[in-house]
Amino acid sequence: MAGNTFGKLLKLTTFGESHGEALGGIIDGFPAGITIDFEAINNDLRRRKPGQSSIVTQRKEEDEVQFLSGIFEGKSTGTPIGFLIANTNHKSGDYSEIKKTYRPSHADYVYEQKYGIRDYRGGGRSSARETVSRVVAGALAKQIVPNIKFTAFVSAVGEISLDKKYQDLDFSIIEDNVVRCPDSEKAKQMEQFIKAVKKSGDTIGGIITCVIQNVPIGLGEPVFDKLHADLGKAMLSINAVKGFEFGGGFESARMRGSEHNDLFNEDGTTKTNFSGGIQGGISNGMDIYFNVAFKPVATLLQKQDVLTNQGEIIELQGKGRHDPCVVPRAVPIVEAMAALVIADSFMLNKIFK
């Protein structure tokens, strides 16, 4: 299987399955001499880990990271950073009934068709549990660019969405509610809605908005390695993501040029920021902001028609511990992938500027 490595100069290779012994990664290209903030890494892992509230999967994993190499006396050495996160609470028996069936909207069928074999325990490599390694790497990437601020939050769950611009939101309350929404009233509505959906055995999708502040001018290359293209690939590589838009996004298609153009101020900043902090594929120093759309979780705790490996359609009810809505736990994942892109581009820019 190819495609397990992300990045150009700062490279992350991940490994492991949902119900294997462990997940982990190797980070190559991490600069030497950086004092590692281990608490920041653990904090991002806590934000992603399962079992943290009643509206997420109740799988209990401590998600404690063990660093194997690349760090000595609290500082990076410049050699590959290897790390492990043990799986301690896997219940593979929950998936025995799907050994010979393919769940709708999962990777089951295409994996088996492509490779001739699949790990049916929780989806194996296709499980969102794989993202725990990304969060570790992203937390480290943030430490390469400590002056750049990454803030992701839930801006929509189903039809419930924020009606304010991100500049009018209080980012300090994002972690004060289990949904991770910077609007207390909307957060309550979203939480109750997710609970109702969960009670019915169904799932619901949502949107995460990410804002990257204090980005220097000049990140990104203007042809195939445009900064927004790299961010798009990073976000679309996350499990369950179905859409990505930055800046004015799809609303831009309804605007005239006279409305959409970001006119300059004398200091080079712009009066508006429909460009989303990126012009010609290069960061312009304004805030980078984008939306990431997540589909509803494919595993439902209600009966559905499934395909067997004998070509029959049968009825099967999902089992196991699953998120009724992935977006609350995906917030640190979006930040992590954004940080990997920005840190990688920052390092490349220092070389090729």
Image (cartoon, rainbow, N blue to C red):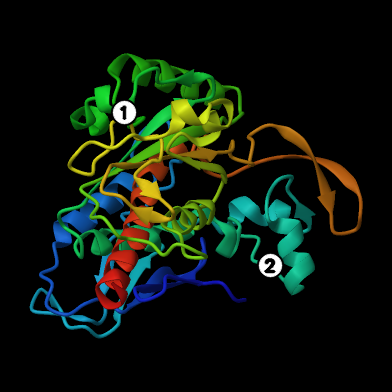
**Image position, residue 137 (x, y; %):** 32, 64
Q: Is residue 115 above or below residue 228?
A: below
Q: Is residue 92 above or below residue 51?
A: below
Along the line of sight, which residue is nearer the eye, 99 or 306? 306
User: Which image quadrant for residue 65?
Assistant: bottom left
Name the residue carrying label 1: 166
**Image position, residue 161 (x, y; %):** 45, 21
Residue at the outermost bottom position: 79
Circle 2: element type:
loop
Q: Give the residue type at disc 1.
A: Tyr
Residue 176 visible somewhere in the drawing: no
Name the residue carrying label 2: 118
Q: Give the residue type at disc 2.
A: Arg
Residue at position x 68%, y 31% in the image: 302
Mark 2 Cα within 10 Å, few/some/many (few <14, many 20+)? some
**Image position, residue 164 (x, y; %):** 35, 19
Q: Is residue 336 above or below residue 270?
A: below
Residue at position x 52%, y 38% in the image: 293
Circle 1: element type:
helix
Residue at position x 52%, y 32% in the image: 252
197 left or right, relative to 339 = right
Q: Quadrant of the C terminus?
A: bottom left
Q: How many marks?
A: 2
Along the line of sight, which residue is nearer the eye, 134 or 9? 9
Q: Which mark is residue 191?
A: none
Q: Find the distance from the CA under tag 1 to the CA under tag 2.
A: 42 Å
88 left or right, relative to 321 = left
Residue at position x 30%, y 82% in the image: 80
Residue at the outermost right position: 311
Q: Are marks 1 and 2 in contact (CB under 8 Å)?
A: no
Mark 1 Cα within 10 Å, few/some/many (few <14, many 20+)? some
Along the line of sight, which residue is nearer the eye, 200 or 245? 245
